């Protein structure tokens, strides 16, 4: 693979050309699928390709990882078999008894896993800087986990302020930036040490790949530990998933910008609908985290919003049942719009209100999307 470095160009240019890599052998502008699990050793016993075995060093990872590192402004990236594999790798790198701080409002399956992770002492906190500050134990807290906007209430956390406090206390900072994407937020530039993505969502964008990613600002000892763990756990994506991920990222910027423009337009219109009690969207001026989001998110507020339906849980589920265009399905970040009653998924410990529907806004015509919601709400 011949690398054409375009690092002076803007992120949308880097993404559209997937860094402009050309396959040396064929001249192809799309990389070949590398399926080999093993790599030849030279007579002198060395590995001239720098690779020995695909669990450690598959060339299938390279383009997606290099592009992700470039888009997040990091030094290196690692792709994983899923977002959960990426996130749990970070927590499993910590020592037994380590203290961590994580938000109460965050991706529910990870919160559930953390609550049961017996090797760690976890303080779950609100999304404000003061909440994180109170929970930090200087010298003992090893990691602060941030998710912003946070699923499914879209709480906003000030990455820069929390990272400063966390570093003063001697803790590392990791940010689940799945919903913000590098299109709107670059956590490393705001002081985070690690960025995590469920690449299943916007990065791939077509609901046909399960994958995850970590990106680092520095090639630190912590990063080296995470790299070793990925090899040991074997939590790697297959070559076809890597190929689809790199392909999906080529359209990341136009997809995500259009989804966010649709989400903002829907949030504004739904706010006036008589059947809706509340719209939760960081782009609305009345949303509690709006000011921080406006500073921290460049050029948009993301494609995710939630609505609280008048009449409670039954009314919310009944409205979702009447949708024709929106698909009732879990997940988010694809080009098609999805709706989900999150409380049904998250169970009794969920901070999610029972009357809430989560909307993952796609790139369809926004009038079509609104009309379907309006007819379903009645
Ligand atoms: C914000 C967020 N983080 C992490 C994950 C987990 O990612 P995956 O499903 O790829 O394991 C999800 C999945 O829904 C998510 O929404």
Image (cartoon, grey):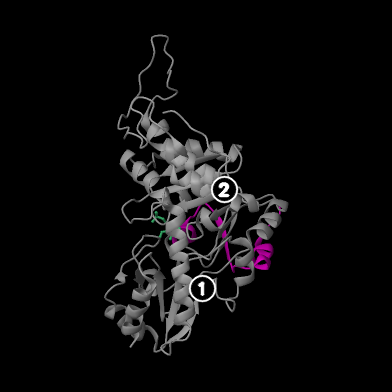
- Gap in Å between the C-alphas at discs 1 and 2? 25 Å
Report which quarter residue 294 is drawn in: bottom right
Is 24 a magenta residue?
no
> Which label was assigned to residue 281?
1
x, y percent for residue 215: 53, 45
What secondary structure is found at the residue carrying circle 2? strand
Callout in the foreground (1, 2): 1
Instruction: Classify mark 1: helix, strand or loop.
Output: loop
Between discs 1 and 2, the one toward the N terminus: 2
The circle drawn on residue 194 is 2
Q: Is residue 121 magenta?
A: yes
Q: Tell me the quadrant of the picture where the C terminus can be found.
A: bottom left
Q: Residues within 10 Å of mark 2 (few under 14, many from 20)?
A: many
Specify the quadrant of the image occupied by residue 128. Answer: bottom right
What residue range appears in magenta? 111-138
Viewer-proximal residue among 187 and 299: 299
Relative to 289, 235 lies left or right:
left
**Quadrant hosting ligand 1:** bottom left
* Residue 349, label in figure: none
Q: Residue at x 41, y 72 (%)?
A: 358
Q: Is residue 47 visible?
A: yes
Residue at horizontal 30 percent and vertical 32 percent from the top? 35
Foreground residue, 207 or 25?
Answer: 25
């Amino acid at each position: 693979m011949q690398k054409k470095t375009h690092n002076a160009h803007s992120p949308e240019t880097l993404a559209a050309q997937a860094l402009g890599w050309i396959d040396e052998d064929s001249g192809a502008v799309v990389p070949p699928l590398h399926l080999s699990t093993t790599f030849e050793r030279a007579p002198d016993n060395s590995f001239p390709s720098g690779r020995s075995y695909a669990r450690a060093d598959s060339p299938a990872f390279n383009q997606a990882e290099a592009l992700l590192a470039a888009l997040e402004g990091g030094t290196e990236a690692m792709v994983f078999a899923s977002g959960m594999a990426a996130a749990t790798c970070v927590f499993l790198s910590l020592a037994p008894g380590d203290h961590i701080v994580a938000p109460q409002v965050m991706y529910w399956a990870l919160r559930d896993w953390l609550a049961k992770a017996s090797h760690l002492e976890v303080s779950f906190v609100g999304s404000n800087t003061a909440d994180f500050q109170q929970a930090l134990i200087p010298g003992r807290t090893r990691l602060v986990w941030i998710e912003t906007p946070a699923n499914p209430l879209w709480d906003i956390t000030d990455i820069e302020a929390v990272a400063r406090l966390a570093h003063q206390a001697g803790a590392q900072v990791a940010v689940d930036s799945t919903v913000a994407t590098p299109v709107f937020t670059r956590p490393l530039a705001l002081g985070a040490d690690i960025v995590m993505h469920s690449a299943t969502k916007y990065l791939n964008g077509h609901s046909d790949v399960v994958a995850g990613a970590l990106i680092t600002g520095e090639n630190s000892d912590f990063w080296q530990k995470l790299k070793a763990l990925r090899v040991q756990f074997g939590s790697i994506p297959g070559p076809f998933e890597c190929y689809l991920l790199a392909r999906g990222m080529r359209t990341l910027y136009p997809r995500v910008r259009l989804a966010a423009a649709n989400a903002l337009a829907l949030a504004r219109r739904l706010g006036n609908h008589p059947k809706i009690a509340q719209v939760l969207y960081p782009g609305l001026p009345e949303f509690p985290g709006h000011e921080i989001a406006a500073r921290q998110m460049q050029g948009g507020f993301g494609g995710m919003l939630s609505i609280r339906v008048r009449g409670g849980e039954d009314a919310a589920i009944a409205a979702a049942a009447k949708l024709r265009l929106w698909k009732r399905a879990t997940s988010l970040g694809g080009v098609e719009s999805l709706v989900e009653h999150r409380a049904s998924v998250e169970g009794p410990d969920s901070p999610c209100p029972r009357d809430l529907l989560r909307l993952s806004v796609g790139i369809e015509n926004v009038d079509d999307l609104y009309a379907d919601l309006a007819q379903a709400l009645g």
